[in-house]
Structure formats: C-alpha cells, structure tokens
Image (cartoon, rainbow, N blue to C red):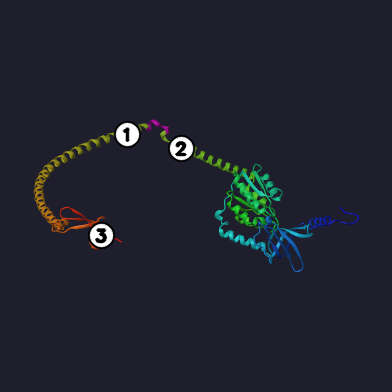
Amino acid sequence: MERNDSIWSVSELTRRIKGTLERGFGAVGVEGEISNLARPASGHMYFTIKDEGAQIQAVMFKGSQRGLGFTPKSGDVVRAFGEITVYEKRGNYQILIRRMEPGGKGSLQAQFEALKKRLAEEGLFAASRKKPLPLLPQHVGVVTSATGAAIRDILNVVTRRFPNLHVLLAPVKVQGDGAAEEVAAAIGRLNEIGGLDVLIVGRGGGSLEDLWSFNEEVVARAVDRSQIPVISAVGHEIDFTICDFVADVRAPTPSAAAELVVGRKDAFTDMLAEYGRRLEGCMQHVLERAKHRLTRSAQHYVFREPSNAVARYRERMDTVDQRMRRELRGSMQSAQQSLDWVSSTLQQRSRSAMQAGRQGLETSSRHMEQALRLRQQRATQEVQRLTLQLRALNPLAVLQRGYSVTRLDDGTILRDASAVRAGDHVRTRLAKGEVLARVVEGKEKG
C-alpha cells in the first residue's frame, strides 16, 4: 500500500522489493563460476556465482543437495536452477538454488550417457531380464502426477476400451527436487501392496530438465527391483530416458502405454466369436465322420445276419477243439516214450558211476593218508628246529650264563654308568629273581 509522503521504513521497503523481485522473476536458471564457497556445520552451501561482468549471491540448502551428482568447489562453472529471493536482514538479493549441475553445453546429456553406460554394463537393460506383459490384466498400478495430462490420457483410454479394469494411482511429483525419490518409493509401495498385474510409470512431455527425474539412478534401480512388469511412458515418442531402457516395455506416450495394457473389448469379443465358429465347424466335421462310420457298420453282414455269424464262429471253435485234442494225445504218447528211455538210461549210467566213484574214493583215501603222514613228519621237524632257535635267542638263557639286566625306575635298560647318580634306585634281573639296589657312588645330581 503506497503512502502519500513516500516515506517507508527499511523493513517495508525491503519487503516491497522482495515481493516485486520474487513475483517478477520466479524460477530462473543461471550459469557462472562459483567463488567464496562456504559449508558451515548446518550442511548448507553459501557462495557467489559470477561471470566477467557481475555476480549474485547464492544459497543451496542441505535438503536440495541429495540429488547432486558432483561436489561443487570454488572455480567450478555450474548451472543453477531456483528462485530469486531477498534476504531481508541484509537487504541482499540472492538465488535460492533447488538444483545444480556442472556447467557447459551438454552436461546433462553427459550425465545421461555415463549412467546409461554403467547400468548397461551391469546388465539392467538385458532382454533376458524383461518380464512379459499379462494378456488380460485386471488391476493396473500407475505412478505419475495426480493432476498431469498423463493420468487423464491413461484413464481416457482405459474407460473407452475396458471400463471394468481397476486402476490404482500412486500420485507423485514428476519433476523438481525429490521427484525421483518419490517415483522410486511409489514403485516399491505398489509392489508391497501386491495384487497388481502391471505398472505404468511416466509423465507427459517436456524438456530434458523436466524429464530428468526419470534419468535418476534411484528410479532405474526401483524399476529393476519391481516384481510387477513395468511399462515406461515418459514424454513423447522422441524422448528417451534411463527408465525406458530398464523397464520391461517402453511406450512412446502414456496413452500408448494404456493401449498396451488393455486391448479393445470389441476386439476380444470378435476373437471369441471367431473361435466359436471354428469350434462349431470342427464339431460338425467330427459328427459327419461319426455318422458315416455308423452307417457303414450298420450295413456289415455281422449286423445284418448275426445268427449266421455266431454259427460260423461256433463251427470254427469245434474244429479247433478237435485238432487240439488230437495233438495233445500224440504229444502225451511221445512224452511217455521219451520218459521211459531216459529212465532206463539213467539207471544204467547210475550203476556204472557208483562203481567208478567207489574205486576212485578208495584210491584218494590212500593217497591222502600218505600225504598226511609225510606232512606231519615235516611239521614235527620244523617245530624242533624253531624250538632250538628260541632257546638260543631266549634272554633268560643268557642270564643262565651269569649275565644280568639292570633297569632304572622308569623301566629303561641301563647301558651307561653315567646315566645314574648317587641315590638312584635300580632293579637288576638275574637268572633267578630280581635285586633292588641303591646307587652309592655315581654322578651327583645337579
């Protein structure tokens, strides 16, 4: 409100300037060199953006730095996007930065290509990872703005083509600070809810900066993790985003995505009608063939004169029965003759075999007796020889000749006098008995 004397307080004038600047400029983008960069403990960034002819103060709060893909420093050329504001306490105008990227032509495109290359090397774009779309989905999830053109286009197509389809909208920001995080979180939530057949993720057209949220890695990872098939519908047909490459299917527009999800209801009706006609034709063909076979069977003589057919089969059975009886009698006579001959032959051979066996057994018995006597003699001689060797090797026999064996307390045989000391006890084995002794003279114990 103006005053007649045109005298303003400093605060009033500053507020007037602030309102004029902020309403007059709104969102702006500026490119220049960073200088005097400061990062206090709060995490905010304060610096100056300058070029050859001027400079402007800038601030970027900590919350806006989450999507920053680089670490700014003094001397960097950057592109900053935000709003013009006035810091009233100092009377300075500044730019409040919402998003910032490295300066120079094509910096966003360079980031796009770098991320695209890295994700491709990880295999996120591989055809083997793509999930097929369901034929007749009943429940569709949509991740987009609640007020944008994309959701209106999708609902328009769905309503015209398949009004019974259930659509669940997860409303999100589709550009600006935090948009990528909201899109990724919405994809995760729809997967957790479950029961959805397919997801549509996207927005309407715009510039590279407007579509940038769908080029963020956090969105690409969320699409890759989705257990539900994802259709990416970002921008227009000429626009491509990282989300398009990771998604299972890319649609050129949101409307095209809806058309991919739902076919025309009348098209399905026509298809079912065609299948019905084909099935009816097949059944008619089967019935005609069955009628033809039935007519031919009814004209067969078996059905015309069944009694004659039975009589013929009975006559054939009688003939077969008589033949089998004759052959059976002949086989039995032949078998009896063969049995008598085998029995006689076995008796003769059995008597001869028994006589030969008895003679062989007597001969073998004599040979075995002779072999046993010879083996017993040899064994007796061997035992005597071994007994003499054992006696010669027996240590007790050595003791009988006056020798002895002395052992220490631990059982070790004493072979060297230096191994005992005065006071040690030893045990001496003689030919008869043992002697326990104490060493009187020997090496002193140290």
Magenta residues (range): 303-309
Picture coordinates of residue 92, whole percent (x, y): 78, 60
Is residue 13 shown above or below 261?
A: below
Classify mark 3: residues with Cα within 10 Å, few (<14), some (14-19) or many (20+).
Answer: few
Classify mark 1: residues with Cα within 10 Å, few (<14), some (14-19) or many (20+).
Answer: few
> Is residue 370 within the magenta segment?
no
Badge 2 amino acid: Arg
Picture coordinates of residue 354, whole percent (x, y): 11, 43
435 on left or right of 123: left
The secondary structure type at the circle numbered 2 is helix
Classify mark 2: residues with Cα within 10 Å, few (<14), some (14-19) or many (20+).
Answer: few
272 on left or right of 342: right
The numbered dot on residue 61 is none
Which residue lies under the disc numbered 2? 296
Which residue lies under the disc numbered 3? 422
Picture coordinates of residue 265, whole percent (x, y): 64, 44
Marks 3 and 2, how far apart at CA: 129 Å
Badge 1 amino acid: Met
Q: Nearer the viewer, mark 3 or mark 1?
A: 3
Picture coordinates of residue 366, whole percent (x, y): 8, 48
Badge 3 amino acid: Ala
